[in-house]
Image (tube, coloured by chain):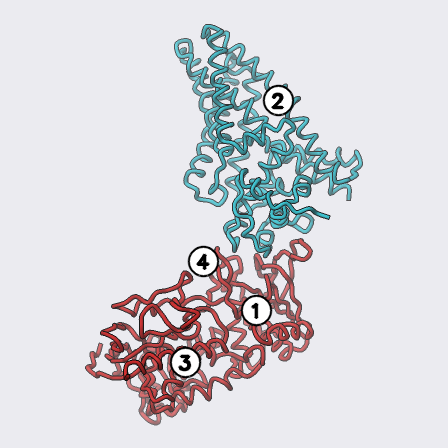
C-alpha cells in the first residue's frame, strides 16, 4: 500500500518544479515523447508519483535519467504543467538523494548556501596563495597537484559511493536479481552512453544540440587529460600545447552558446534555469576561457607579471572540482550513463 | 458601394440566424414585435441545420430545424437579411439603437428564384463546397444546400468567371450581376446577439497531421457524412473512398488545452462523438469505433444512459489523450497515446480518424458595437453580466445574448437560452411602452 505525501510537491518545487498539481493525467506528454516506449512510459508516471509523493517509487526509478529533455511534452502540455521541467527537477532531486553527504540537496535547495560555498573557496585559494607569498611557480605546482588529488578523492569518497547508492536504490532495494553476467554484458552500454550520449539523438530535431554537447564532453574530458596527465601548463611539447588550446576553445565556445540559449530562452529546454544550471554552464565557460588565457599568458611570457590570471583560473577550478563536480550538475555525466547501464542490466535480466 | 438611404424601423435586431437567434426571433415575433434577423451565411438555420441527429434522443436535427426555419421565414413580423452583417451598432439612448447592416450582393433576386438548379447545371466552375465542409464540390452558381432557407441560388463571385452561362440558363431571369453591396441603416429598440461559435481548426495542432493525412476528418465533416443531406450517401474515407471499418475519435481536439489557447471544455464533443459512434454502428454494422477520451462528461439529462448505451453497442472507450497521428502508406493512421489505465504508451492503427473539434468564441460581433463596449468574458465569449439572475443580460442595457455566443452549450440549452433572451428582451421593450 502506498502512502500519499502531499508535501512532497513543495519539496520538489525547491528543486525547480512547477505546478505539478495542474496535471489532469491525459498522458499527452508520454504520447508525444519520442524516447518513451512500452517498457518505460514517462513522464506522466513520474508526474503522478510526484503528485502523490511516492518518493520510494521515485528514487527506485531510472526514468528521469532516460529523458533527454527535448521539451516537446512541456510545449504541448494542455495544462501547462511543464512535465519536462519536472523531469529535470527530479534529476536534481535524485542527485541529492544519491549523495550520501547530503550536501547536494543543501546546495540545490539553497542559493545562499551555494554562494557561501563559492565564496569560502575564493577566500581559501587567496589565503593559500598568500601563504605561498604569491609565487607563481609554487602556486602552479600545488595547483597541478590539487587537480590530481581532487580527481582521486572526489571520485573515491563521493562519486563512487554515490553510484553504489544509486545501484542500491534502483536495483538492490526493489529486489531485482540480475546475474553477474548481465553486468558484464551491459558494460558496453555504459561506455557508449558515457562518451556519446547517443540516446539524446532519439529526441526530435536534436542533432545539433547533441553534436554541441558531444564535442563539449569530448573537449572537456580531453582537456582534463591534457592538463592533468600531459601537464599542459608546464609542457614544451608543441602538439600538447595546441591540443590544449583547441580543447579549451571548444569548451568556452560551446558553453557560450549554451549560456546564450538560456538567456534568450528560445527553446523549451532553455526556458527555465535553476541556479545549478547557471553555475554549471558559466563555470564550464570560465574554466575553458581562463585555461586558454593562462596558457596564452605563459606563451607570451606575461604570466610572471600577471599572477592574478592564474589565481582566477585556480579559484574557478577549485570551485568546480569541490562543488560542481561532486555535488552539482556535473554528476549527470555519471548518473545518466549509469542509468543507461542499470537499465540495460534490468532488461537483460528479462 | 451603394449607399441606400432606406431607413428601416424594427423593435429588435437579432444578429445570427442559428437555432438560438431563430428561437429568440420567433418568440418575439409571436408576441407582436417587429424583428430584423441578420444572418452572415446564405441560409438561416446555423450549424444545427447541417447536423445529422441530436443527442441523446437521436432525433433528426433537420426535422427539428427545418419546420422552425420555415416558420421564421414566413412570419409576417420577421424580416430576414441573409448574406448580411450588422456593422455599426450604436446606442442613441434608452430603447434607441441604430445599426448599419451591410448586405453583400447575392447576384440573384431571391424573390424570383424558383430553386430549379438549372444555373448549377450550366455553371462550368467547380469549387469545394463549404456547406459540406470540403467533402464535396459545388458550382460557382449554387444553392447552398438542399434544405437551405431561402432555397435560392447564389453566385460565388470570387470564383465566378463571368461567362454568363447561368444567366442564359435561368428560366426566370433572376440572376442579376449588377447587384452591389448595400448599407442599410436600421433603427431598433433592442438587440439580441446570437452569433454562435467557431469550430476549432485542427491545423493548429500540427502533430495531428490534419490536412496532410487524407483520412483524418473533423467531427463536423463526419456530421455531414451522417446527415440526411450527406454528400456520399454512405460513410467513406476521403483519401480513397474506402468504407472505413476501424474508426477512431480523438476527443478534446482544441478543448481543455492551454497550449493552443483554449483551456475550457466545449461541453458538446463527448456527447456528439458518442452519438456519431452510435450512428456509425448503424451505418457500418461491421465497423469498430474507438473513442479516445480524457474524461467522458455526460452531465445532462439522459446523457449518462446514452453513454452506457454506446458502450453496450460495442463502442470502445480508451482513456488517454492522443499525442501524435501519423499516416501509413496505405492511408491508415497510427495513433500514439498513453493508455492511462495501464500507464503504458501504445500505438493503434485505424483506417479513419475523426477529430472531435471544440467550440471557440466568435468575437467579431464585439467590434460592431461602437458607442458602448460589449464586454467579453475571459474566454472571449459574450460576457453575461448577471448570469444567475438575468442570464441574457450583457454589459450594454438593451443588448441581450442568446445561445453559444455566451459560451459552449448544446442544442437544448441554446434553445433555452434563446427563449431566455427573448423573454428578457420583451421585458425590456415593455418598459419602453409603459
Q: Could you confirm whether marks 1 and 3 are on the same chain?
A: yes
- Give the left or right position of residue A46, taking residue B49 as reference: right
Calculate the distance from the C-alpha at mark 4 to the C-alpha at mark 3.
36 Å
The answer for how far apart the CA atoms under marks 1 and 3 are is 35 Å
Going from N to C along the chain, the mark reached first, 4 or 3, is 3
Q: Which residue is mark 2?
A: A154
Dot 4 or dot 1, earlier in sequence: 4
Q: Position of residue B162 (x, y in %)?
A: 31, 80
Quadrant (top left, top right, bottom left, bottom right) of the C terminus of chain B: bottom left
Between label 1 and label 3, give the one nearer the viewer. 1
Q: Which mark is residue B261?
A: 4
Viewer-nearest of labels 4 and 3?
4
What color was chain B assigned in the picture?
red
Density class for disc 3 (Cα within 10 Å; few <14, some 14-19, many ≥20) is many
Mark 1 and mark 3 lie on one chain; the one further toward the N terminus is 3
| Secondary element type, mark 4 | loop
Same chain shared by disc 4 and disc 3:
yes
Report which residue position mark 3 lands on: B139
Assign the N terminus of chain B to one quadrant of the image.
bottom left
Using a 10 Å C-alpha cutoff, classify the residue at mark 4 as few (fewer than 14 neighbours), some (14 to 19) or many (20 or more).
Answer: few
Considering every residue shown, the one lying at the far bottom of the view is: B171
Separation (CA) of disc 1 from disc 2:
58 Å
**Contact, mark 4 vs mark 1 (Cβ under 8 Å):** no
Work out whether residue A69 or residue A81 is closer to the camera in this orientation and state it. Answer: A81
CA distance separating discs 4 and 1: 20 Å
Q: Chain of mark 2?
A: A
User: For this rendering, which residue is in front, B322 or B207?
Assistant: B322
* Quarter holding residue B405: bottom left
Q: Are marks 4 and 2 in contact (CB under 8 Å)?
A: no
For residue B284, above or below residue B206: below
The shade of chain A is cyan
Residue B166 x, y percent position in the rendering:
35, 86
Amino acid at each position: 500500500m502506498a502512502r500519499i505525501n502531499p508535501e512532497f510537491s513543495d519539496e520538489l518545487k525547491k528543486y525547480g518544479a512547477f505546478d505539478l498539481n495542474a496535471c489532469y493525467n491525459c498522458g499527452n506528454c508520454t504520447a508525444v515523447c519520442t524516447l518513451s516506449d512500452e517498457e518505460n512510459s514517462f513522464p506522466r508516471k513520474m508526474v503522478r508519483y510526484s503528485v502523490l509523493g511516492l518518493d520510494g517509487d521515485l528514487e527506485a526509478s531510472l526514468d528521469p535519467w532516460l529523458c533527454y529533455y527535448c521539451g516537446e511534452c512541456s510545449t504541448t502540455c494542455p495544462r501547462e504543467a511543464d512535465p519536462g521541467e519536472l523531469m529535470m527537477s527530479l534529476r536534481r532531486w535524485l542527485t541529492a538523494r544519491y549523495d550520501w553527504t547530503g550536501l547536494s540537496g543543501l546546495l540545490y535547495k539553497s542559493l545562499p548556501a551555494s554562494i557561501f560555498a563559492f565564496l569560502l573557496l575564493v577566500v581559501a585559494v587567496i589565503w593559500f596563495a598568500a601563504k605561498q607569498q604569491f609565487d607563481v611557480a609554487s602556486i602552479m605546482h600545488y595547483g597541478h597537484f590539487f587537480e590530481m588529488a581532487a580527481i582521486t578523492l572526489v571520485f573515491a569518497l563521493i562519486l563512487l559511493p554515490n553510484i553504489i547508492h544509486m545501484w542500491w536504490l534502483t536495483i538492490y532495494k526493489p529486489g531485482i536479481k540480475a546475474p553477474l553476467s548481465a553486468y558484464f554484458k551491459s558494460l558496453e552500454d555504459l561506455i557508449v552512453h558515457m562518451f556519446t550520449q547517443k540516446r539524446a539523438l532519439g529526441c526530435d530535431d536534436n542533432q545539433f544540440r547533441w553534436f554541441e554537447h558531444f564535442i563539449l564532453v569530448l573537449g572537456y574530458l580531453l582537456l582534463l587529460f591534457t592538463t592533468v596527465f600531459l601537464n599542459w601548463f608546464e609542457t614544451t611539447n608543441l602538439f600538447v600545447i595546441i591540443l590544449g588550446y583547441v580543447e579549451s576553445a571548444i569548451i568556452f565556445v560551446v558553453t557560450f552558446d549554451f549560456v546564450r540559449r538560456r538567456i534568450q530562452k528560445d527553446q523549451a529546454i532553455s526556458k527555465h534555469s535553476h541556479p545549478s544550471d547557471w553555475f554549471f554552464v558559466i563555470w564550464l565557460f570560465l574554466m575553458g576561457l581562463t585555461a586558454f588565457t593562462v596558457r596564452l599568458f605563459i606563451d607570451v611570457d606575461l604570466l610572471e607579471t600577471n599572477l592574478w590570471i592564474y589565481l582566477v583560473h585556480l579559484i574557478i577550478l577549485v570551485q568546480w572540482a569541490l562543488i560542481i563536480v561532486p555535488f552539482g550538475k556535473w554528476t549527470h555525466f555519471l548518473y545518466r550513463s549509469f542509468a543507461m547501464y542499470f537499465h540495460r542490466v534490468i532488461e537483460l535480466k528479462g | 458601394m451603394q449607399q441606400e438611404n432606406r431607413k428601416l424601423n424594427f423593435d429588435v435586431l437579432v444578429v445570427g440566424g442559428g437555432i438560438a437567434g431563430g428561437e429568440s426571433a420567433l418568440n418575439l415575433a409571436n408576441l407582436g414585435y417587429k424583428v430584423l434577423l441578420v444572418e452572415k451565411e446564405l441560409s438561416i438555420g446555423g450549424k444545427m441545420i447541417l447536423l445529422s441527429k441530436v443527442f441523446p434522443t437521436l432525433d433528426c436535427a433537420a426535422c427539428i430545424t427545418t419546420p422552425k426555419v420555415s416558420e421564421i421565414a414566413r412570419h409576417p413580423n420577421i424580416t430576414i437579411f441573409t448574406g448580411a452583417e450588422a456593422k455599426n451598432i450604436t446606442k442613441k439612448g434608452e430603447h434607441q439603437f441604430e445599426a448599419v447592416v451591410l448586405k453583400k450582393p447575392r447576384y440573384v433576386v431571391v424573390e424570383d428564384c424558383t430553386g430549379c438548379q438549372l444555373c448549377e447545371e450550366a455553371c462550368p466552375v467547380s469549387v469545394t463546397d463549404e456547406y459540406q465542409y470540403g467533402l464535396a464540390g459545388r458550382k460557382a452558381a449554387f444553392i447552398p444546400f438542399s434544405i437551405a432557407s431561402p432555397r435560392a441560388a447564389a453566385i460565388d463571385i470570387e470564383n465566378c468567371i463571368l461567362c454568363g452561362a447561368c444567366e442564359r440558363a435561368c428560366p426566370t431571369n433572376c440572376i442579376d450581376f449588377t447587384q452591389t453591396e448595400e448599407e442599410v441603416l436600421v433603427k431598433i429598440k433592442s438587440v439580441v446577439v446570437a452569433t454562435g461559435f467557431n469550430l476549432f481548426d485542427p491545423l493548429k495542432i500540427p502533430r495531428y497531421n490534419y490536412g496532410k493525412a487524407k483520412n483524418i476528418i473533423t467531427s463536423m465533416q463526419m456530421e455531414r457524412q451522417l446527415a440526411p443531406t450527406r454528400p456520399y450517401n454512405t460513410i467513406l474515407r476521403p483519401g480513397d473512398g474506402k468504407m472505413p471499418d476501424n474508426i477512431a475519435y480523438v476527443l478534446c481536439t482544441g478543448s481543455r488545452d492551454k497550449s493552443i489557447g483554449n483551456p475550457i471544455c466545449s461541453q458538446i464533443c463527448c456527447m456528439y462523438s458518442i452519438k456519431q459512434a452510435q450512428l456509425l454502428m448503424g451505418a457500418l454494422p461491421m465497423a469498430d469505433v474507438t473513442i479516445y477520451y480524457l474524461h467522458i462528461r455526460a452531465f445532462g439529462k439522459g446523457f449518462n444512459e446514452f453513454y452506457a448505451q454506446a458502450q453496450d453497442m460495442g463502442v470502445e472507450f480508451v482513456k488517454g489523450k492522443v499525442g501524435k497521428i501519423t499516416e501509413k502508406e496505405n492511408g491508415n493512421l497510427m495513433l500514439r497515446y498513453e493508455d492511462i489505465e495501464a500507464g503504458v504508451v501504445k500505438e493503434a492503427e485505424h483506417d479513419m480518424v475523426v477529430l472531435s473539434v471544440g467550440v471557440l468564441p466568435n468575437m467579431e460581433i464585439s467590434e460592431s458595437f461602437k458607442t458602448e463596449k460589449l464586454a467579453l468574458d475571459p474566454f472571449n465569449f459574450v460576457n453575461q453580466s448577471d448570469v444567475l439572475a438575468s442570464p441574457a443580460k450583457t454589459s450594454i442595457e438593451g443588448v441581450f445574448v442568446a445561445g453559444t455566443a455566451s459560451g459552449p452549450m448544446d442544442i437544448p440549452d441554446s434553445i433555452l437560452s434563446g427563449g431566455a433572451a427573448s423573454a428578457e428582451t420583451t421585458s425590456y421593450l415593455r418598459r419602453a411602452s409603459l
